Image (cartoon, coloured by chain):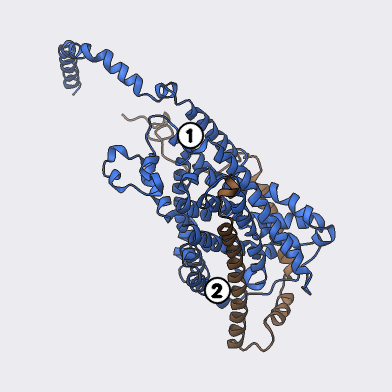
Chain colours: A brown, B blue
Amino acid sequence: MTMLAIDWGFALLVTGMGMGVVFLLLIVLIWIIGLQTKIINGLTGSVKSASESHTVATTETHPTPHEQAAIAMAMHLYYNAHDEEPHVITIQEVEKRYSPWSSKIYSMRNTFIK
Amino acid sequence: MKQIKKSLFRLTAFLGLLITPFIAKAQEENLGESLSKFMNDTGFARLVDGNWWCLVMIAIACFLMYLAIVKKFEPLLLLPIAFGMLLTNLPGAGLYHPELFEGGHIHWPDFVDANNVGLLDYIYLGVKLGIYPCVIFIGVGAMTDFGPLLANPKSFLLGAAAQIGIFATFLGALVLGFNYAEAGSIGIIGGADGPTAIYLTSKLAPNLLGPIAVAAYSYMALVPVIQPPIMRMLTTQKEREIVMKQLRKVSKTEKIIFPIVVTVFVSLLLPSAAPLIGCLMLGNLMRESGVVERLSKTVQNELMNITTIFLGISVGATTTASAFLNYQTLAILVIGIIAFSLGSAGGVLLAKFMNLFLKNKINPLIGSAGVSAVPMAARVSQTVGQEANPGNFLLMHAMGPNVAGVIGSAVAAGILLSFLG
């Protein structure tokens, strides 16, 4: 009964149109980004195609992209490992604060006042 | 001085002794009545008086707090949600009144009488008016680097394919007896985007806000559990080993122009998606422009954290026993996981399909990152990829579809809103 009560024409329209619009919109964005890259590269005087010129540029960097990725991964694992460490209390320097218990004024070793 | 204090004390004691019989006499008649009224007003009495289901909700709230604190399942949101759930289900506390928002509308005249309005009612207005999800999106935008997406725009397609979970689940929810608006709200769980799910549900089916938010955030926390089996099932060992070409460097100018172009284009084509996309891109422009460092830091930290607290508590507040303990919640939890799985599978399958035509093959594992659980889905791609090939670094490649998924799910929400709203 539930199946019959649904206007499947409308439901399929929403589904089809929905997926269609999502794809269409994002495909147009791909095109826009491509165009934007070309224009920017044109303005900055790059003759080579964006992908070619940038591939060369990135492989020449030091550390190499693969090394960068390895460093990033190592850092990620390192910090994750830190999160799981037990909270061991270590010796910590603390600033000395005034307290009547530690005050020199009330010390027993003060000189006797006549 | 001591003498004065002593005299004052004696005087007070004398006066106290003098007036005590009068007070006792006055109260004697009403004492029994007052005690009885007090006892009946306590939450314990209300629990006994047919509100036992509140105990079930309190138990569920405690379980969610356990998941957040001990298991660390999206604690930033699950903890406030769980506590909001606890507060709203305390009998007699009167912190949240669903009747003020009955029928999907805010009953403003009832807000005049402050005695009938609870604290959570005021906080919930931010959800109802669609403020919190948009503010959170500003923070998300400020924390997102669209560089990997700009370097490899094909990632947009993977982000789009992962949205198939939303629309497939929409149909599934209709079959299970939900109406169009409710089905659309349930479907958005497949987008794996919490603020978008809350935004759309608060507009289309506010009665389901609690279960949908809980399902969305629970499944987002379970990304590392849900996705890997699907990814392994749909790919071969050889495909998982594919090493992708290094991404090109993206200039600052490109990164600055991108949010402006996307906002204008998407908002003109789909005005209903403008609030989400606009806020996301505003945050990103703050980050990339580099001229408003203070604002960028504020939206990434303070503003986002404050809004997260309010959003979590108010979403938790909607999970009253009557709204949560029913067949619909169970159905939402089941359909939600299907939505999530379908979204992940959609991205992987499209990546495989694209490989049929591409010269530089893409690793299909990055397709599953098209669901917008940032950055967890991308991390899962990286982990599963490294299982197959320890020298493979897919993280940055997977971030492309991942952030494309954020845009994709916001667009999908806009479409559902314009069709079903």
User: Callout 1: helix, strand or loop?
Assistant: helix
Residue at the spot of label 1: B321
Circle 2 Cα neighbour tier, 10 Å, few/some/many (<14 / 14–19 / ≥20): many
Indicate the quadrant where residue B218 lies.
top right
Residue A101: quadrant of the picture: top left
B168 or B263, which is in the foreground? B168
Expressed as whole percent of the image width and height from the top left, the position of residue B382 reads 72, 58
Q: Secondary structure at mark 2?
A: helix
Q: Chain of mark 1?
A: B
Residue B29 in the image, given as x and y percentages of width and height = 21, 12
**Farthest-out residue, right:** B238
Q: What subunit carries mark 2? A: B
Q: Which image quadrant for residue B333?
A: top right
Residue sitting at 53 percent across and 36 percent down? B326
In the visual, does B96 lie left or right of B365?
left
Residue B321 x/y as whole percent:
48, 34
Q: Which residue is mark 2?
A: B258
